[in-house]
Image (spheres, helix red, strand yellow):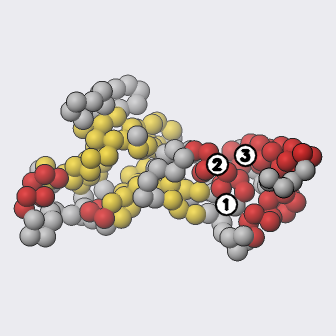
């Protein structure tokens, strides 16, 4: 866009906002994709239908930009200690949600616990918040030959992740990391 003319930049920005609105309503964006966003999509092979992001929260602006110009970016949340994924957004055509990691998967229990020395409380309404604790068959039972680490990170079968999360009601409860 740096080398584009002012008219091309205006067209791109208008198309960007129109496509986001159409996507949010679940309406087709085929023509905009072919006319405006095709060159960007081709840089990733042109065949992506959606992509997953995990490991760290993706900034809302980045998620929105990639979702509009390339393909919908779906966030998830997980840890090595939980065998990967613990929560994930439903795939498109569900409404795109920015800065949310999704709903917990069926095999994992998630609870938010008050975080000492912070203002995060699982009793906050309407959005409970606190440290994310996980439990389930895919969550580890402890560190191999490291009882000291296991005692630091486990409590009655719950993995204390150290991550701060917030529940947001939206059809389901969506978890967001702070």
Please identify the quarter of the rendering in which residue 173 is found.
top left
Residue 30 in sight from this viewpoint: no
Q: Residues within 10 Å of mark 3 (few under 14, many from 20)?
A: some
Please identify the quarter of the rendering in which residue 91 is found.
bottom right
- In primary-sequence order, the first of circles 1 and 3 is 3
- Residue 55 image position (x, y, % from top left): 42, 58
Answer with left or right where residue 43 lies relative to residue 166. right
Callout 2: SS: helix
**Residue 131 badge:** none
Residue located 36% across and 58% down the image: 78
Residue bearing mark 3: 20
Residue located 17% across and 53% down the image: 153
Callout 1: SS: loop
Q: Count the marks: how many?
A: 3
Q: Is residue 40 above or below residue 110?
A: below
Q: Residues within 10 Å of mark 2 (few under 14, many from 20)?
A: many
**Residue 71 badge:** 1
Q: CA distance from mark 1 to mark 3?
A: 11 Å
- In primary-sequence order, the first of circles 2 and 3 is 3
Residue 165 in sight from this viewpoint: yes
Residue bearing mark 2: 64
Q: CA distance from mark 2 to mark 3?
A: 8 Å
**Of 8 and 26, which appears nearest the observer?**
8
- In primary-sequence order, the first of circles 2 and 1 is 2
**Of 144 and 168, which appears nearest the observer?**
144
Q: Residues within 10 Å of mark 1 (few under 14, many from 20)?
A: many
- Residue 105 image position (x, y, % from top left): 38, 57
**Of 6 and 139, which appears nearest the observer?**
6
Are the residues tagged 2 and 3 within 8 Å (C-beta)?
yes
């Amino acid at each position: 866009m740096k080398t584009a003319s002012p008219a091309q930049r205006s067209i791109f920005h208008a198309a960007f906002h129109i496509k986001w609105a159409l996507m949010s309503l679940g309406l087709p964006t085929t023509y905009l994709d072919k006319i405006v966003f095709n060159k960007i999509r081709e840089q990733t092979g042109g065949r992506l239908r959606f992509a997953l992001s995990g490991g760290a929260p993706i900034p809302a602006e980045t998620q929105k930009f990639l979702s509009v110009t390339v393909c919908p970016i779906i966030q998830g949340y997980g840890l090595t200690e939980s065998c990967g994924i613990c929560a994930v957004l439903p795939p498109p055509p569900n409404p795109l949600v920015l800065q949310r990691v999704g709903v917990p998967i069926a095999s994992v229990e998630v609870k938010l616990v008050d975080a000492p020395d912070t203002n995060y409380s699982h009793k906050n309404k309407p959005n409970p918040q606190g440290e994310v604790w996980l439990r389930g068959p895919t969550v580890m039972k402890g560190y191999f030959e490291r009882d000291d680490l296991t005692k630091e990170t486990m409590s009655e079968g719950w993995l204390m992740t150290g991550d701060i999360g917030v529940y947001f009601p939206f059809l389901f409860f969506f978890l967001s990391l702070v």
